[in-house]
Amino acid sequence: MNKHILWIILAFKVMEMPAQDMENYYQYTLDWTNINNAYVGVNQSVDWLLMSRSQYYRIPDSPKNILGLLQMGISDKLGLGLKVINDTRGVFGVTRFDGIYSQRFDLTNDSYLRFGISFGVLNSGLNPSRVSNAQALIDTNDPALSSSYYNYTRFTSGFGTVARIKGLELGISAPHLVISDNWRRPFLFVTASYEYAIPESPITLAPSLVVQHRPESYHVLDGFINIRWKQFVRVIGGYTTDNRLKLGLGLSYENFSVSYLNDNPIGARTIASNNSNEVLLTIRFNRRSREIPIMKSEVQKLIDETALLLAGDYDKDYLRKRIIEMNKQVDKLISKNSKATAKEVEKELNELEEQLELIIEKYNLSNE
């Protein structure tokens, strides 16, 4: 049988099984923003993400998925995003445009809830011209090829939520909860991850689990681990219950990072051409670290008091006592510090340190 005809048959079969189609449409191992809207804006920065996935690389017109996402943290609680997905499989193509909104609700200093929702449009089309010698193989004027069953534009919406408690993150999401005029039981993702920093080591471990709930097909459990060395290198390894191994590598430098993942079937599913390749490129234009309001107010209070001390002529014993108290307060603030501490707060701490040094020098307290 001509390989192009075989591919057309396979492509039609794929379109008849949309739940299985989601397996590739929502690439996520390198970054979870694609499957959960709540992650949009979580880094308090302006980021541009480009993700690409290709499968069955030796088959003509094999599935290819490209995602572009521009996201930004409007504040430490609000995030906005614009996402475009283009997915092609033989003669079929799907393009989706989404606007995304997310919001964070603090529970304690190191735990919070985030919610995200998306609204957009999905355009699906069939293009027989993608097949070589299409005129000779099929009747391109066949009304079935231009019917609304394969060619349509629909409204779509999805949601996601994430709970973070210290280093533990739990999430649930339905990226396509609603597709107008084509209701089906939603495809769900349930995620869990835990970040553990090895004491006195630059290495951080982040084991993760993803459950793909496919109501019209078999469900999949995906387990993998991210191993990070500082913020520069990460190694990914994992296994899914549909017999696939995942191996990946990521490199980061300042505001630029790139990651690669190979997803390879094993066992009975092993076919030379049946592996997938994913690439993630991230560019950070402007980083805004998460601000800790309580910490900021305490630091500002210390700075104001220190400024008054510099301007006055106080007793040395009082100054010595006050400096000891302030040092204790600074130590307390530092103990509350985390990776999420705002750069603005760090700057204020540096200013406070400089002012304390001036007091010590001015009143000759260093040797007393």
Image: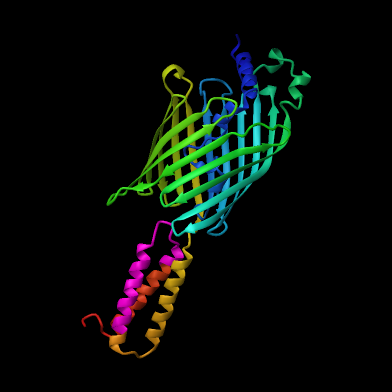
Q: Is residue 37 left or right of residue 249?
A: right
Q: Main secondary structure of the magenta part?
A: helix
Give the quadrant of residue 104: bottom right
Residue 135 falls inside the magenta stretch:
no
Against 310, residue 128 (above or below) is above
Quarter of the rendering occupied by the C terminus: bottom left
Quarter of the rendering occupied by the N terminus: top right
Residue situated in front as seen by the camera: 257 or 322? 322
Residue situated in front as seen by the camera: 241 or 285? 241
**Which residue is located at x 69 percent, y 34 percent?**
123
Q: Is residue 136 visible?
A: yes
Q: Is residue 271 visible?
A: no
**Which residue is located at x 61 percent, y 32 percent?**
87
Against 24, residue 353 (above or below) is below
Q: What residue occupies the far front of the structure in this picture?
A: 107
Q: Is residue 277 left or right of residue 91?
A: left
Residue situated in front as seen by the camera: 177 or 133? 177
Across and down, in percent, residue 19 comes to: 60, 28
Magenta residues (range): 319-346
Residue 329 falls inside the magenta stretch:
yes
Across and down, in percent, residue 250 comes to: 41, 41
**Which residue is located at x 32 percent, y 77 percent?**
325
Across and down, in percent, residue 179 comes to: 68, 36
